């Protein structure tokens, strides 16, 4: 059980980083400093952004549940 939860944490963590990096920069932060302020027509759809937000929240919930599960396994073992 512990190995399965650790695998879920690693895979969901990597996928979460990828999803966060795919978000469009809102401006005024580090994304502007490194060229993120340049407007691009790639993925400018609001539906795509909304779906990306939903997917990011779902993956973060899976990641959090796996972390809690690892904590419970470690406590009751």
Image: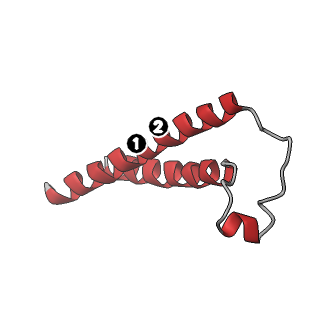
On the image, which quarter does residue 14 sit in? bottom right
Q: Residue at x 83, y 41 (%)?
A: 42
Helix, strand or loop for disc 2: helix
Which of 55 and 31 lies nearest the eye of the viewer?
A: 31
Q: Quadrant of residue 49?
A: top right
Q: How much space separates mark 2 and mark 1, taking CA atoms?
A: 5 Å
The tag on residue 32 is none
Label 2 CA crowd tier, 10 Å (few <14, some 14–19, many 20+):
few
Task: Examine the rendered structure and indicate whether residue 22 appears above or below residue 47.
Answer: below
Q: Residue furthest front?
A: 28
In the rendering, at what x and y percent does residue 32 appear? Answer: 74, 65
The residue tagged with tag 1: helix, strand or loop?
helix
- Whether residue 32 sits left or right of residue 74 in the image: it is right
Given the current orientation, which residue lies at the most extreme left position? 76
* Image quarter hosting the C terminus: bottom left
Q: Which residue is mark 1?
A: 61
Label 1 crowd bin: few (<14), some (14–19), many (20+), radius 10 Å? few
Q: Give the residue furthest to the top.
A: 47
Q: By what rule are the colours in the image chosen?
A: secondary structure
Question: Is 37 situated left or right of 49 in this image?
Answer: right
Q: Which mark is residue 58?
A: 2
Mark 2 and mark 1 residues within 8 Å of each other at the beta carbon: yes
Q: 49 above or below 2?
A: above
Residue at the spot 74% in from the left edge and 32% down from the top edge: 45
């Amino acid at each position: 059980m512990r190995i399965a939860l650790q695998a879920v944490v690693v895979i969901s963590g990597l996928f979460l980083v990828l999803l966060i990096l795919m978000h469009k920069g809102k401006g005024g932060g580090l994304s502007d400093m490194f060229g993120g302020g340049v407007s691009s027509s790639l993925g400018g759809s609001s539906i795509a952004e909304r779906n990306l937000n939903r997917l990011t929240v779902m993956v973060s919930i899976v990641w959090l549940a796996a972390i809690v599960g690892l904590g419970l396994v470690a406590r009751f073992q």
